[in-house]
Amino acid sequence: MSPARLRAVLASDARRVSRDGLLAWAVAIPLVLALAARLCAPDAVELLEARSVEVSAWLPLLDALAFAVVVPIMMGVVIGIMLVEEKQDGSWEALAVTPMSLSGYLAWRSAGCAVMGAVASLAGLQVSGLSALGAAEAAVVAVGAAPLAAVTAMALACLARSMTQCLAAVKLAMVLSAIPAIGLIGSPVGPGPAAMPEGMAALQIQQWSLLLALIPSWWPLKVYEAAASGGQAAAHLLVSWLLAMACTVMAVHRAGRGQ
């Protein structure tokens, strides 16, 4: 894509986000979450623990879920919604008379969305103060979380046929993506048995790891665990990106067949 065309697309995106309250809110979520955590978490923890409610042990898990899962997904939602709107107004068909193919355009959008997700994730991790991650560790987590943004955008753009389907898919994606967080309970970044509600400690959560690994958000969470505990995150990073690329290719292929 030429620099002039790139500037035109970015300017168009900025105008659309500024005019759409839903998109503007989605873009603002990382900063809102991070600032809320920074300003409110210390007092909330102190208040709850004064009442014998163990909260501190859950903060790294909340940090991982918020900024390695929710934030990149929201960045993907922003791009995904814009792509669905483009599909509905016929912009995808118009690509047929331009040098760029639909698959090439979607690949470019996917790459840009991954960068956007990484930046938002890194900013949230650094501002929130919910964990002791340093800048280098946070950067590793952000790179591992970036594919979630791309997968979300491409899944919405290529599979949703209407805005109603798109919004329903967003709700489902949020629920499914949060499920793997239970796999960190009892891990170095999750609460131990003493911090769990009564009866929860008896759950054999680790037995479900193989099933949780089928959900893309599992891998950014494992990257977070490795980065926070001083472990090796390279394998988890690799799987996170490979799984995202496979999902993206399948979604783009389906979109191409539908045109």
Image: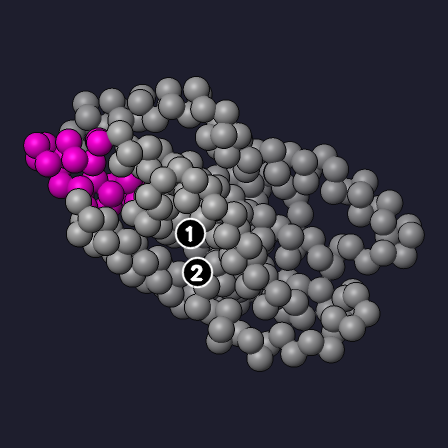
Q: Which residue is mark 1?
A: 148
- Where 27 falls versus 197 (above or below)? above
Q: Nearer the viewer, residue 252 or 132?
A: 252
Q: Which residue is label 2 attached to?
A: 216
Asked whether the beta carbons under mark 1 and mark 2 sit within 8 Å of each other, the answer is: yes
* Between 176 and 116, the one nearer to me in the picture: 176
**What's the magenta region?**
90-117
> Can you say which quadrant of the picture contains the C terminus?
top left
What separation in Å lies between label 1 and label 2 (alpha carbons)? 7 Å
Whole-percent x, y for residue 250 in the image: 26, 58
Residue at image x 47%, y 69%? 213
Residue 52 appearing in the image: yes
Looking at the image, residue 209 sits to the left or right of residue 117; the answer is right
What amino acid type is highlighted by mark number 1? Leu
Q: Amino acid at mark 2?
A: Pro
Taking the image as shown, residue 59 lies to the left or right of residue 47, namely left
Mark 1 element type: helix
The residue lying toward the viewer, choosing from 7 and 200, is 200
What element does badge 2 sit on? loop
